[in-house]
Image (spheres, rainbow, N blue to C red):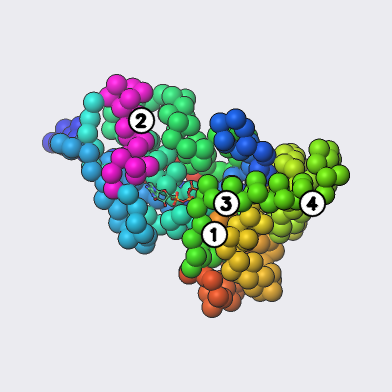
Amino acid sequence: MTRPRSLHKPVTARAHGKINLHLGVGDPGPDGYHELVTVFEALGTPETVTVELAAEDSVEVTGRYASAGIPLDENNLALAAVIAFREHTGWGGNVEITIDKQVPVAGGMGGGSADAAAALVAVAKLAGFEDREQLRQIAATLGSDVPFALLGGIALGRGRGDDLTRVLSQGTHHWVLATSTGTLSTPEVYRRVDELREQSAGQSPASSGDEQGPDVAQGVGDGETRSGPARLAEPTEVLAALASGDIEKLAAHVHNDMTEAAVSLLPDIAHVMDEGRRAGAHAVLLSGSGPTVGFLAQNATHALELAVLLEASRGVREVVRTTGPARGAHIVT
Ligand code: ATP
């Protein structure tokens, strides 16, 4: 006779880190948030979150990045997700959360957001809650990258990045990620973007209010950034390259508006990017607000070659090989 299934069985869910194939940053609104147009790609680096009913809430972090100074209280994004779930649904359980951390911390890869998305899916399963749309709404209250971690794949994000449209794509992308020996704070990089734009507008008044067409605004390859007024162009070329599976075209059009600001705060990033270009990377792209840098390779063998060359570079803490696109948050047990 089979045993009845326990209602208290732990539930494990997985979500992934991301890179932004395009990150266009607009001017800050009255609430201080910058308007974004971005193309997310979920990468194979997994965060695995196990949620179990317990007498009181707790968080434990294991895995490759367990000791990276991650908060274990309600500031932890996985526990924040469970707290938001309770508030929105009226569910009353306390939970023990275990996070197996494989996404580099504070590198612009959205590891904390992946933890939040995985925790949401896991706690929903534990509570027998099946309304995915409400989960998406709860995710949006937790941070602008959390809805994408829930969705996965490749998606176009607008607003704060949380207004998502799925993007069609063909093929697998081989990425090498170089984490940095330095650190950057996301709000500080946004502030620096604004400062550089103000300086640039001050130096060249003719450029302020300049209405550049979409071709001009987005046609910057390998992650370079120009200062100046925000121009939120549609990443049309990136979307076309994804649909056709043309890696060369994709490499020519990936772009991150935060690159110059990140490099000005942490100059080693420029050195690491140059090393990747010299080593033959198709595209060199700052991941989100950095400081991790992503290098697009032709295939798995090319990725291995790039990884070996980058490992010795000044400013590189470690090198991670992965592929994309990867799935959104899902149950694994
Ligand atoms: P962001 O750009 O959103 O700041 P990121 O992608 O650069 O994030 P994360 O690894 O998500 O980097 O961590 C950002 C910060 O969030 C960390 O420095 C940490 O203090 C805090 N944090 C809270 N919960 C978590 C979590 N579960 N995992 C990682 N970091 C967390």
- Distance in Å between CA atoms under marks 1 and 4: 28 Å
Identify the residue at image location x=67%, y=57%: 260
**Front tag of 2 and 4:** 4
Instruction: Please state which of residues 153 and 273 is positioned toward the viewer in this rendering.
Output: 273
Disc 3 from disc 4: Cα separation: 21 Å
Q: Nearer the viewer, residue 138 or 133?
A: 138
- Of labels 2 and 4, earlier in sequence is 2
Our reading of the magenta stretch's main secondary structure is helix
The residue closer to the viewer here, 92 or 180, is 180
Q: Is residue 54 rendered magenta in the image? A: no
Amino acid marked by disc 3: Val
Classify mark 2: residues with Cα within 10 Å, few (<14), some (14-19) or many (20+).
Answer: some
Q: Which residue is mark 1?
A: 291
Question: How many other residues sit within 10 Å of disc 3, few (<14), some (14-19) or many (≥20)?
Answer: many
Which mark sits nearer the N-terminus, 1 or 4? 4
Q: Nearer the viewer, mark 2 or mark 3?
A: 3
Q: Label 4, secondary structure: give it.
A: helix
Q: Which mark is residue 203?
A: 4
Number of marks in the image?
A: 4
- Name the kind of residue labelled 4 in the image: Gln
Q: CA distance from mark 3 to mark 1?
A: 10 Å
**Contact (Cβ within 8 Å) of mark 2 with mark 3:** no
The C terminus lies in quadrant: top left
| Residue 167 place in picture, x, y as percent | 64, 39
Circles 3 and 1: CB distance less than 8 Å?
Answer: no
The location of residue 199, given as percent across then percent down, is 72, 50
